[in-house]
Image (tube, rainbow, N blue to C red):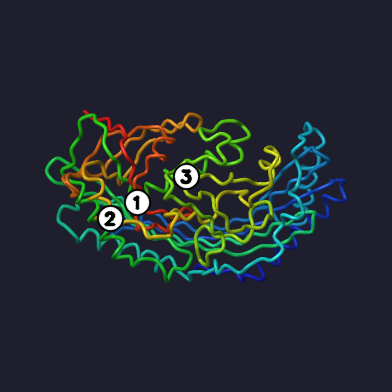
Amino acid sequence: MQQALEPNAAADTLQDVVRFALAHAARLGASQAEADASIGQGLGVTVRLGEVDTIEYQRDRGLAVTVYFGRRKGAASTADLGRDAVSAIVAKACAIARFTAEDPYAGLIEPEALARDIPDLDLDHPWMLSAEEAIDIARRCERAGMDVDARITNSEGASVSSQRHTGVYGNSLGFLAGFCATSHSISCTLLAQHGNQMQRDYWYSAARDALELETPESVGVRAARRACARLGARKLSTRRAPVLFAPEMARGLIQHFIGAISGPSQYRKASFLLDAAGERIFPPFVRMSERPHIPKALGSAPFDADGAATRDRELIEQGVLQGYVLGGYSARRLGLKTTGNAGGIHNLLVGTDAGAPGLTADDLLKKMGSGLWVTELMGQGVNGVTGDYSRGASGFWVEDGAIAYPVHEVTIAGNLREVYKNIVALGNDIDVRGTIRCGSVLAAQMTIAGD
């Protein structure tokens, strides 16, 4: 049986470790220090063709300590939370700091940026799941998919995962806080065959609370239907046409935007959106809002990795970039203030500026007329400096607003600045299984390379 940690006991233990590490750093002469301690545990099971493939039980502990001697920085980590090990790792961090070069931007964030009120975001929902129960759920998921169609002939497996993480962060500015968070998932990947052609596809469900997962059967059935729909896939001749990104693919498209406006990309001058604050990046109807305090959301957090408060903010208004995504260090490098994004974005909501719902899937297909609906992307052909984008893709060719036939082995290409500027419409089919909450995205002309 997977045992849930008592939230208070785990947090109290980690707080004691962090307090001790910070006090020891001060005794060794550090002018500033920060420490991040965590305990994680989880259960993962994979079943393939009804047989147990893997069972993994994971329990991790860790402490990362960073010390500053003026503007010189040293860092060290350990998996041992005992007093002797903590003392040793703090001493190692101090020794490293004494030999590093000064960095004028090194140090903790400004005290006024620290989170003072820590909201309860309802992120902790342990799933008391035994390995036997997880195996049964995975089998039900796979079996439901295999029973959908005789053309489902093989499986890459169904998986069930349950994770719980308790973390505490503290620094010498007096900040000390932590919280517990869970994440659970069910997934399935199936193969369909007709004649000599074989296609694979998948589906998954993820949530903080296991009660909010899709049923195992529905995950398996959806994976099977997706795989069968891809049978008979054809190649396309090279052309230019509109491209409709399914929600889970559109999320990646937006992730490239976030990477380009992140602090490290900006101060390293390695971004196709360098110094773009105040510019119109998207059409005027596009709005992007960060909402870090949505209860139970996978991207929610009361504070960032620096201890800075997370707050609601508008990242894109009427298509215009309002600012960057910054942690404390990158903000100083740019002469700006932290935006509470050390460690990344927190629940980015992609929608229309007027707040109106996006189009339905059918309406998006009709609006596209003829073009490529992309349901899978492959490869990593994205240049973050130039914005050049080229990735393998598969999906469906659309004619007169209706699906004509499945497509595979093509490449879609363009420049992300142009892709973003020429977005035609957004969908209301919002995918909430990540830190970016996005529906389908319809882009105007892109190059589709095929035969």
Residue 81 horizontal side relative to residue 324, left or right: right
Q: Nearer the viewer, mark 1 or mark 3?
A: 1
Q: Position of residue 199 (x, y in %)?
A: 23, 45
> What is the distance, in whole Å, between disc 1 and disc 2 at their CAs?
8 Å
> What is the distance, in whole Å, between disc 2 and disc 3 at their CAs?
22 Å
Which numbered disc, 1 or 2, marks the residue that appears first in the sequence?
2
The C terminus sits in image quarter: top left
13 to 369, vertically: above or below = below
Q: Residue at x 36, y 35 (%)?
A: 391
Q: Position of residue 21 (x, y in %)?
A: 78, 54
The quadrant where residue 44 appears: bottom left
Residue 367 horizontal side relative to residue 56, left or right: left
Task: Kindly state the secondary structure of the residue where label 2 is placed.
Answer: helix
Q: Which residue is mark 2?
A: 361
> What is the distance, in whole Å, between disc 1 and disc 3 at their CAs?
14 Å
Task: Name the residue type under label 2.
Answer: Ala
Q: Which residue is mark 1?
A: 440
364 or 62, which lies in front?
A: 364
Q: Residue at x 42, y 30 (%)?
A: 388
118 or 47, which lies in front?
A: 118
The quadrant where residue 11 appears: bottom right
Q: Which residue is mark 3?
A: 255
Task: Name the residue type under label 3.
Answer: Gln
Which numbered disc, 2 or 3, marks the residue that appears first in the sequence?
3
Q: Is the C-beta separation of discs 1 and 3 under 8 Å?
A: no
Q: Is the C-beta separation of discs 1 and 2 under 8 Å?
A: yes
Task: Kindly state the secondary structure of the residue where label 3 is placed.
Answer: helix
106 or 25, which lies in front?
A: 106
Q: Position of residue 203 (x, y in %)?
A: 32, 55
